[in-house]
Amino acid sequence: MTEVVGRFAPSPSGRMHLGNVFAALLAWLSVKSRDGAMVLRMEDLDPDRCRAEYVETLRDDLLWLGLTWDKEQTPQSLRSQAYEEAFEALRARGLIYPCYCSRTELHAASAPHAADGRVIYAGTCRSLTPAQRAEKTKAPAWRLMVPDQVWGVKDGLQGWYEENLFRDCGDFIVRRADGVYAYQLAVVVDDAAGGVTEVVRGMDLLPSTPRQLYLYDLLGLRPPEFFHVPLLLSPDGRRLSKRDRDLDLGLLRQQKKPEEILGLLACWAGILEKPEPASAQELAKIFTWQAVRTDPVVVTR
């Protein structure tokens, strides 16, 4: 029987908030309820947002909560060679091309948008000739060509989800103009390298899954199972973010014990009937995905 391997993949761009902890807790419980292993990976691809000082804070917060890990993967900032190999494999097959579109052009009012606000790339640079590309003076981003084809996933919590990659997404970026590899490529390469068998993450990332499954297929990699968990929302319907300082662990650790935080989150998830203190180990003994809610959680302060 294959060992269950899950992962924490926080971004060191600020202190974790309750929404981050909610997803991390469910990822940990899913794995540990089946005696699996957890991998910790710092997703620090973006040098403009990520800070080294947050790395130790993230580790300390997870340990304080009792959400331990069994091994740590090399941070993304040190894995550019692995991403380059995948990038070159795609380029060798003629599957990627340079894109010179500006942000303004991409977000023009005439550009098609998905229901969730994403811009659907119109393929402007896909058919440029070599001569037209030679005339460009700016550094390009690189996009992966997608087929007019439906790719779907049977999510372990949300059920079936699918997108037509061409109509609902369009060719997507795998390397930015500044040379930073895109999340979609990096996360596929990293999860495969880490032996990850299941990915538990927020509902906001469900639309990324068809693109990632397409990349798994192109690169000849085995995809994990996916579980997309509810988002925590503020009363006005806005997703919690690291800007919500009163709900980050910096302040909450001064006010609450870890068992109180975990018990509250477990109640919100549907694992406990009421918010009572519980350790991660105690919750793992009763965890089942059948108990976890699928709709967003509105957080009142």
Image: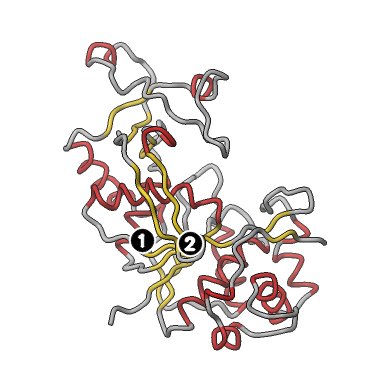
Q: In which quarter of the image is residue 295?
A: bottom right
From mark 2 to mark 1, how far is it between C-alphas? 10 Å
Q: What element carries label 1?
A: helix
Q: In the figure, 301 relative to 105: above or below?
A: below
Dot placed on the residue nearer the N-terminal end, 2 or 1: 2
**Which residue does the image show at 46% across and 31% down from the upper left?**
120
**Which residue does the image show at 27% across and 33% down from the upper left?**
96
Q: In which quarter of the image is residue 231?
A: bottom right
Residue 254 as seen in the image, left or right of residue 32: right
The label on residue 9 is 2
Residue at the extreme front:
160
| Local crowd size for mark 1, using a 10 Å CA cut-off: few (<14), some (14–19), many (≥20) | many
Residue closest to the eye, 205 or 85: 205
Q: Position of residue 62 (x, y in %)?
A: 58, 72
Residue 191 as seen in the image, left or right of residue 130: right
Which scheme is used to colour this image of the protein? secondary structure
**Which residue does the image show at 51% across and 22% down from the upper left?**
111
Q: In the figure, 35 relative to 297: above or below?
A: below
Q: In the figure, 197 relative to 92: above or below?
A: below
**Which residue does the image show at 36% across and 61% down from the upper left?**
191
Residue bearing the label numbered 1: 191
Residue type at mark 2: give it. Answer: Ala
Q: Where is residue 17 in the image (x, y as percent from the top left)?
A: 67, 61
Quadrant the N terminus occupies: bottom left
